[in-house]
Image (cartoon, rainbow, N blue to C red):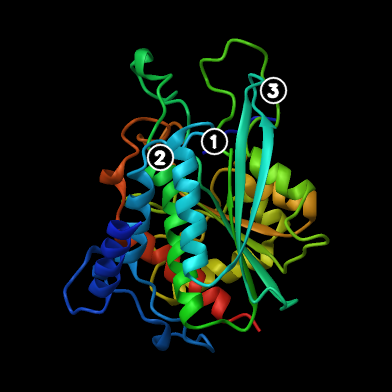
Amino acid sequence: MTTKRHYPLIAAALLTAIAIAACGSNRKTAADTPSPATPAETTAAVQAPPFCADSAYRYVKEQVDFGPRVPNTAAHRACGDYLIGKLKQFGATVHVQEADLVAYDNTILKARNIIGSFQPGNRRRVLLCAHWDSRPYADSERDKQKQRQPILGANDGASGVGVLLELARLIQQQAPAIGVDIIFFDAEDYGIPTFHRGAYKADTWCLGSQYWGRVPHVQGYNARYGILLDMVGGRGATFYREPFSQRTAPAQVKKIWDTAHSLGFGSFFPQEDGMEVTDDHIYVYNLTRIPCVDIINYDPQADSGFGDFWHTHADNMDVIDPATLNAVGQTVAAVIYNEK
């Protein structure tokens, strides 16, 4: 996760199947309370398939179970292989961009952007993205001895990927009218830490999206717009309208927030502006001119703007709420299934 400041596999498959089956049961889950309106109850022209929050939760947990997904580690490599396998399982045409990226401290990061394309021949496309790496530092910890340890990043990283994996599963079952590209950006969260004593360096965050923006997976790639998911699983999360997204993708911001309200998720998506953040959507837009909306948790009561567990060791599965995953996932599904 970037600083977001104003700086200028058999067992896994079985568990996933159990989680998906649970969505078809009549039992109550956190995603059912409060119960939002279903797409059929809204004015949406096309009913999106039901988003399964239990399934998305399982995908988040399966990533976290690898441990911190920091570039150049075994956990990072294993999780990347898992993500490639899941996208292939869901019928996507998979592209893997391997790149040596230079971190703020000149560490060479063996990075992989992982792209799953659905209906690759369809020129009408929408881009969905999230970062899949986790922060190498817990630099928001009060205990300085813990600040140089990597975090699990359940919310900051894994939650967005979990939602997109569930959307990939839905797309395999019921294709929308448009082509969809799901991109898992790497090396987003290796930015300069707060304890760094050297001069501040610009553009040390979002290295994977910077690389993709300059070298897209398909020459001349274009999409109508993009949606970036970042920290979309936290309990009690609120997604205010991010100002850079407002300036560069106003029509898409309105569409997403209006859709969320029509589905009964207004408490998650306030019709208010939040804090401008440095995130992958900026580089997607600046380097490709594809408008990209950042759906990102903003907590106006927190000093950081992102909650007390942001960039700490408390960012684990305890903070993940299926109700939040459901609100984001069903909203994004309704938006893309109503593209013509």
**Which of the pair 63/237 is nearer the observer?**
63
Residue 189, disc: 1
Cβ atoms under marks 2 and 1 closer than 8 Å: yes
Circle 2 residue: 153
Residue at (52, 65) in percent of width and height: 88
Q: Secondary structure at mark 2?
A: loop
- Closer to the camera, 94 or 322? 94
Give the percent coordinates (x, y) of residue 340: 66, 84
Disc 2/disc 3 C-alpha distance (Å): 23 Å
| Mark with earlier residue (1, 3) | 1
Residues packed near mark 3 inside 10 Å, few (<14), some (14 to 19) or many (20 plus) = few
**What residue is rendered at 33% in x and 65% in y?**
55
Label 1 sits on what residue type?
A: Asp
The residue carrying pointer 2 sits among few (fewer than 14), some (14 to 19) or many (20 or more) residues within 10 Å by Cα, namely many
Quarter of image, res 206 = top right
Which residue is found at the position 51% from the left and 39% from the top? 1
Residue 201 is marked as: 3
In this view, 115 is above or below 132? below
